[in-house]
Amino acid sequence: MAELEELLQVATDMLDRAYTPYSHFQVGAAAVGASGKVYGGCNIENAAYGATNCAERTAIFSGIAAGEKRFTALLVTGNTEGPIAPCGSCRQVISEFFDQDAVIYLTNQKGSLAETTVAGLLPGAFLELK
Ligand SMILES: O=c1ccn([C@H]2C[C@H](O)[C@@H](CO)O2)c(=O)[nH]1
Ligand SMILES: [Zn+2]
C-alpha cells in the first residue's frame, strides 16, 4: 500500500510537467526500477504527432537511461473518468522491461484504481529475446 501511495504521488506530480499543446491531455506515470528507485514520466507531444512520447514510456526510458535493466511495478494516472488505459505502443514497451506478472496500477485523479498485470495488458506479447 505504501508503494501504491508513493507511486500515485510521483505520477500525479508529473501531470504538471506534461508537454501537451496539441491534446491538452496530461498523463503521469511512475515506474519502479529493480533497484527500488522510482522514475516519473509525463507525456511529451510533438508537432509531428507520431513523435509523441507517452508518460509510461518516458518513465521507463528515464529508468533505462539511469541504468535500470528491469522494472517491478508501474502506475499511470490522468484526468480520465475511469482508470486510464495505456496505448498499444506502451503495452508493448512495458512487456519488454517488466515480468509478465508485474503489477500495473491504472488510476485517475478521482480515486479510481484498477490493478492488472503486464500479461493482463498485453496477452501473448511478442518478445524476441524470451
Ligand atoms: O496511457 C496514455 C494515454 C495517452 N497518453 C498521451 C499521448 C498523448 O500525448 C495524449 C493523448 O493521447 O495522451 C499517454 O501518455 N498515456
Ligand atoms: Zn502510450
Image: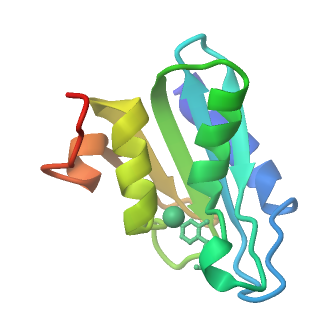
Q: Quadrant of ligand 1?
A: bottom right
At 25% from the left edge and 29% from the top edge, which residue is drawn?
Answer: 129
Where residue 20 appears, as percent x and y from the top left, is 79, 77
Observer-nearest of 86 and 106: 86
Where residue 87 appears, as percent x and y from the top left, is 43, 68
Determine the residue located farthest toward the top in the rendered image: 35
> In this picture, is 79 found above or below 67?
below
* Residue 110 in view (yes/no): yes
* Residue 79 in view (yes/no): no
Where residue 75 appears, as percent x and y from the top left, is 54, 45
Observer-nearest of 100 and 52: 52
> In this picture, is 76 found above or below 32?
below
Question: In this image, 123 relative to 60: left or right?
Answer: left
Image mark count? 0
Determine the residue located farthest toward the front in the rendered image: 128
Question: In this image, 107 relative to 17: left or right?
Answer: left
At 60% from the left edge and 59% from the top edge, which residue is drawn?
Answer: 77
> In this picture, is 105 found above or below 97?
below
Task: Identify the coloring.
Answer: rainbow
Question: In this image, 111 relative to 86: left or right?
Answer: right
Q: Quadrant of residue 90?
A: bottom left
Q: Quadrant of residue 111?
A: bottom right
Where residue 81 appears, as percent x and y from the top left, is 52, 79
Q: Quadrant of the C terminus?
A: top left
Q: Quadrant of residue 16?
A: bottom right
Determine the residue located farthest toward the left in the rendered image: 124
At 52% from the left edge and 57% from the top edge, which residue is drawn?
Answer: 107
> In this picture, is 85 found above or below 64?
below
At 46% from the left edge and 73% from the top edge, which residue is drawn?
Answer: 82
